[in-house]
Amino acid sequence: MAATEPRDEFVFPDVFNDPDRDAFLYGTFPEGFIWSSATASYQIEGAWDEDGKGLCNWDVFSHAKGNVKNGDTGDVACDSYHKYKEDVALMKAMGLKYYRFSISWPRVLPDGTLNNVNEAGIAYYNNLIDELHRNDITPMVTLFHWDTPQTLEDQGGWDNVDIIDRFNDYAEICFQRFGDRVPLWITFNEPWIVSVKGYGLGEFAPGIKEIGTKVYRVSHNIIKAHAKAWHTYDDKYRKVQCGKVGITLNGDFFEPFDRTKKAHVYAAETFLQFCFGWFAHPIFVNGDYPEVMKTKIASKSKSQGLESSRLPEFSEAEKAYVKGTSDFFGLNAYTTQYATDSQDASSHPPSYWNDADVKTWQDDKWPKAGSIWLSVVPWGLRRLLNWVHDQYHVPIYITENGVSTSDVYELDDQPRQKFYRAYINEVLKAIKLDGVDVRGYTAWSLLDNFEWASGYSERFGLHYVDFNDPARPRTAKKSARLYSQIVKDNGFVKK
Ligand code: GBH
C-alpha cells in the first residue's frame, strides 16, 4: 500500500540514484499511446464580444490597467474563433490524433446560467469538433480553463457555493450538445492556480488577495463542483456516450534537497501533498484532505486564535460523494523545485505558504526557459510520474508539458526541441523502466498564445503566431517537426 501521507524515507526506485539518470533511452511507447497538443479558450479564441458571448473574468481582468504585462488582452489572441480550421490543419500536418482545447463557459452560457443559451457559441464548438473528426483528430475537452462568466464572478465566483450547481448545469449542457463526439472530458484545469493565483495572490483573475483563507474555500467548492459534474456524467451520459471524465492537476515536482535527511524528504512530500494531495486525496483516495494538511492548518488556525480551521471540512456524505470521481489523473507538469523544512516556521500572517512549513527553490544551475518559474529539469518529470502513480494508482494522462521562450521570432527553436526530446524521453523511462501507467502526452502549446498575466511576452507554441499582423499567421517552428517525428515513430528509434 502506498502511503498517502508524507514519508520521511526516500522511497523511489534506486534507478534514480543511477549515474545514468540522464542517459537517453531508445524505444517506443505502448500501442495506442495518445499524442496530443493543447490550447485554452481565453488564450487563443479572441472574439471576446462576438456573436452573443458573455463577459468572462479574464476580459474584465485584462481590460483593467496594470494586471497584464504591456496591457495585453485576449480580445483577439490567435483569432482561433475565426481561424479554427487553420488550427486543425496544423495538427493534421503534424500527424496528431488528439487535440485538447477548452470551452468558454460564457460563450455557451453568456450569464453563466441556463436562462440564456447562446446557440452561436454552441455552433462554434460543434463546427470545431466536426472539423476535428473530419480530419481524424479526437477532441479532449476541458470544461473550465479559468474563464468564469463575469456575472458569476460578480456573485463571489468560486467562493460562492451556488457556483457548484451553475457549473453542473454548464457541464451538463456540454455533455448533451457535444458529448456524442467527445470521449475525454476534463472538468477543471489546474484548480491550484485558480485558488492560489486567482483568489490568493491576486496575480490572475479575479485578482483577489486572500491567501490564508479564501484559497481553501475556493478549492473546496471546486472539488465539489468537479464531483457533481462527474456524477452527472456517470448517472446520465456514460452509458450512451462511453467517455471518460477526469480532472487536471498541476504542481512542480519537489525533490528533497538532501534525500538522506529525513526532514528534507518529509518536507518535499508535504509540499507534494499541499499541491496535488489538496485535490487528489479527496478525489482519488478517500473523499478527504491529506492528514498533513488537516493537522497543520488546524494547529496554525488555533495559534491564530481562530475557532475553527481555515481548511473547510467535508461531511461524511460529501466524502462518499467525492471519493472516486475521476476516471484518470490529468497531469500538467513543467518543472521541479528543491524542498527543505522551513527554518523560519511561522504562523503569521495566515497563509497557504506558511501552513506547509516548507521552503522551496530552484537550482541556479538548472537551465532557465522564457518564464521565470520554468527551470528545465527533465528527470523531475519521471519522478513526478512515479510519485503520482505510487499515490493514486490510476491511469495518468499528461495534459500539458512544454516550454517557453521569450518574445523573439525564432523558428529554429533549439531550446524547445531539446526540451521535448528530453522530457518525452523521461516519460518513456517512467513507462518502460518504472512501470508507470501513462496513457498519453500533450504538448503545451499548439500555438503561441495569450500567456495570462505575461500577455504575449512568453511564447510556448510549436507554431509561431505573429500578433502584430491582423491575419495572425501561424508558422511551424522546428519543434513542431521534431514532435511530429516522435509521434510518427511512437517514440525514439535509432536511425
Ligand atoms: C499552465 O499553467 C496553464 O494551464 C496554461 O494555460 C499556461 O499557458 C501554461 O501552463 C504555461 O504557463 O511561482 O508559486 O506562483 C501552469 C503552470 C504552475 C506556472 C505554477 C506557474 C508558478 C507557481 N504554472 N507556476 S508560483
Image (cartoon, grey):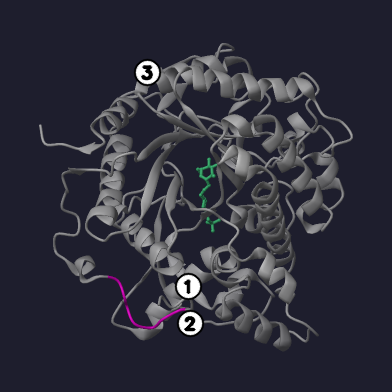
Q: Are marks 2 and 1 in contact (CB under 8 Å)?
A: yes
**Magenta span has 203?**
no
Residue at mark 3: 93
Residue at image coords 70%, 20%:
123
Q: Is residue 148 left or right of residue 487?
A: right
Please provide the residue range marked out in magenta: 6-12
Q: Residues within 10 Å of mark 3 (few under 14, many from 20)?
A: few
Dot placed on the residue nearer the N-terminal end, 1 or 3: 3
Rendered location of residue 229, percent (x, y): 69, 50
Magenta segment, principal secondary structure? loop
Residue at mark 1: 359
Residue at mark 2: 343
In this view of the protein, which residue sits in the foreground, 36 or 321? Answer: 321
- How far apart are the two marked residues, 2 and 3, measured between alpha carbons? 53 Å
Residue 404 drawn above or below residue 87: below
Provide the secondary structure element on which disc 1 rests: strand
Residue at image coords 34%, 73%:
257
Quadrant in the rendering for residue 490: top left
Rendered location of residue 450, percent (x, y): 57, 33
For this orientation, the residue located farthest to the right is 115
Quadrant assignment for the C terminus: top left
Quadrant in the rendering for residue 237: top right
Tally of numbered tags = 3
Q: Is residue 391 left or right of residue 69?
A: left
- The kind of residue on which mark 1 rests is Lys
Q: Residues within 10 Å of mark 1 (few under 14, many from 20)?
A: many
